[in-house]
Each structure stands twice: as C-alpha cells, then as structure tokens.
Amino acid sequence: MNQNRLFRLLWLSIAAAVATIALKTVAWALTGSIGLLSDAAESVVNLVAAVIAMLALRWALKPADEEHAYGHAKAEYFAAGVEGALIVIAAVTIAGAAVARLFEPRAIEQVGLGIAVSAVASAINLVVGWMLLRTGRRERSIVLEADGRHLMTDVWTSLGVIAGIAAVSLTGWERLDPIIALLVAANIVVTGSGLLRRSIGGLMDRGLDAPEQAAIARVLDGFECEDVRFHALRTRQAGSRAFISLHVLVPGAWTVQRGHDVVEDVEAELRAAIPHATIFTHLEPAEDPRSFADTTLDRT
C-alpha cells in the first residue's frame, strides 16, 4: 500500500471540498435556490468527512503493537460510520429547510450563472471522486472508497439539482425547487445508510465477500482428497486486511514434517489467491474425534 499516495488523495479531497463549498455557496447566493443550498450543505459534510478520513487512516496504518496484535485497520470502519452518520444528519437538515420553502416558495434569480458555477464544482467532485474510488478499491481502503462514493453521490445530486433549477426557470413552478431538495435529501440518506451498514458489518467481523470466499474454496478444493480435509473455516475483514483461519485434517500416522509441508502449501496458495490475507491454520489428526469438536462453518 502506497501510504503517501493515499494521504495525497485525502489532502486533494479536502482541497476539493473547500473549493466546492465556496463555489456552491456562491451559486446559492446568486440564485436563492434551496436546492443549491442543499447541495452546498452536502459539500460541508464532504469536508468534515475528508478530515475524519485523514485522521482515521493515519491511525489504521499504524503497525501492530502489544495492545493491538492484529493492527489498527478497523479504525477505517469508525471513520466510514461517522461519515455515514454525518450524511444522514445533513439529509435531515436539508429536508427541514426544503419543507419550510414548500410553504413559502421564492423566485430563483440569475439561473444561468448559478448553474454554471455549480457545474464547475461538480466537475471538481467528479475528478476527485473517481480518483478516490479507483485507489480505494485497488488498495482495499474503505475510508478512501467511502469518501469517493460520497463525492460521486454529490456529483449526481448536483446534476439533479442543476436540471431541476433549469426546469424551475423554464416552467416558473417555484415549488419544484424545494421538491428537488427533498429528493436530494432522500438520495443522501440512501448513501449514508449504506456506509453505516458497511461500517457496522466490519466492526462485527463480517466475513469476506463472495468472490474471495469462492477463491478460498477453489484453493481448498485443489488440496482436498482422501487424506487431506478441511473444516472450521472462518474469515473476517478488517479495513484493508483479511484474516482466514481453518483446520487441516490429515492422517494421524503422517509425520509432523509431512503434515507441515501440506499446511505450508495450502497457506502459500491462499496467500497467492488473496494477497492481503493473514492466514492461521491448525493441523489435526483425522482419526481423533476431538478434531471435530470445533466444526462451525464446516466444509465436510
């Protein structure tokens, strides 16, 4: 993992948030649109989330120590959870302002200039969000991916707002502006809820995703035979790291060296299939009934 690149991207995200807040605030001031105000509010959340992501990533990348033998990677889930909560709070705030405007609609001014300024802000978010998503997926960083998803959501939100403001200008239907803001709020809630679910899943030691589970199964199937079997397979994800544990059953008459060689080959294949994984194996004699005392998620 290129740590310097990750932090450069987060600094870029912070700079983009500051720039888009300024631009969208200008767009709102020019037009008086509650839709554009809701868009600006989401960019404020972007800024707070980017700062939290920076702090969380610094903590997550700290090496393991005596108190945290498995590392600090789960700090990323806290950051994603906080960002999800902030997104939901922003949505509630936006919805409140939009409902008030529904009862007191106002005309929108300088529509063309306001839309142009908002479009520039959206272009900035599009570029930075795409970079964060691509790097987050490659480096398996939920913090970068969450920040990238939030920015990309902001882009679609902004495009919807721009289209809505243009429609208000063309039709003269002023209540369309707060209706757009309410739709923005609903879209933000969906994004925030998704981040919260993923954060909670990570903190609760959720297993690896289906493609990785399938890769593990392919490796074990390649070794499984009359003499070699597996059970008690468990997996979990912690930020950018994965953990795999399993029991390897071999004939009790085998020498320790022979059994150890099989285990080493299995671990090597698993590491090749899932390079970011830490693997724990336990060698057991297949004939001993005690070997089957722990067979949760049994493959046999």
Image (cartoon, helix red, strand yellow):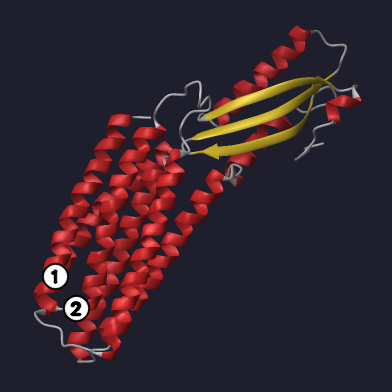
Can residue 55 be seen by looking at this rendering? yes
Q: Quadrant of the N terminus?
A: top left
Q: Of the residues shown, which amino acid type is indicated by label 2?
A: Ser
Instruction: Please state the horizontal and vertical placement of residue 251, each as a whole percent of the image.
Output: 86, 17
Residue at point 57%, 31% (across, down):
273
Q: Residues within 10 Å of mark 1 (few under 14, many from 20)?
A: many
Which numbered circle lies on residue 153? none
Instruction: Please state the horizontal and vertical placement of residue 164, each as a whole percent of the image.
Output: 26, 79
Horizontal placement of 26 versus 39: left or right?
left
Can residue 131 be seen by looking at this rendering? no
Horizontal placement of 109 versus 33: left or right?
left
- Residue placed under numbered mark 1 in the picture: 27
Instruction: Please state the horizontal and vertical placement of residue 22, each as a whole percent of the image.
Output: 14, 60
Mark 2 vs 1, N-terminal side: 1
Q: Quadrant of the C terminus?
A: top right
Which numbered circle lies on residue 33? 2
Instruction: Please state the horizontal and vertical placement of residue 126, each as a whole percent of the image.
Output: 26, 56
Rendering quarter of residue 274: top right
Q: Secondary structure at mark 1?
A: helix
Rendering quarter of residue 61: top left
Q: How many marks?
A: 2
Q: Do the numbered discs 2 and 1 sit on residues whose CB atoms are within 8 Å? A: yes
Above or below, comparing residue 164 to residue 150 in the picture: below
Q: Of the residues shown, which amino acid type is indicated by label 1?
A: Ala
Above or below, comparing residue 115 to residue 279 in the picture: below
- State how far apart marks 2 and 1 are (Cα): 8 Å
Above or below, comparing residue 189 to residue 271 in the picture: below
Q: Secondary structure at mark 2?
A: loop
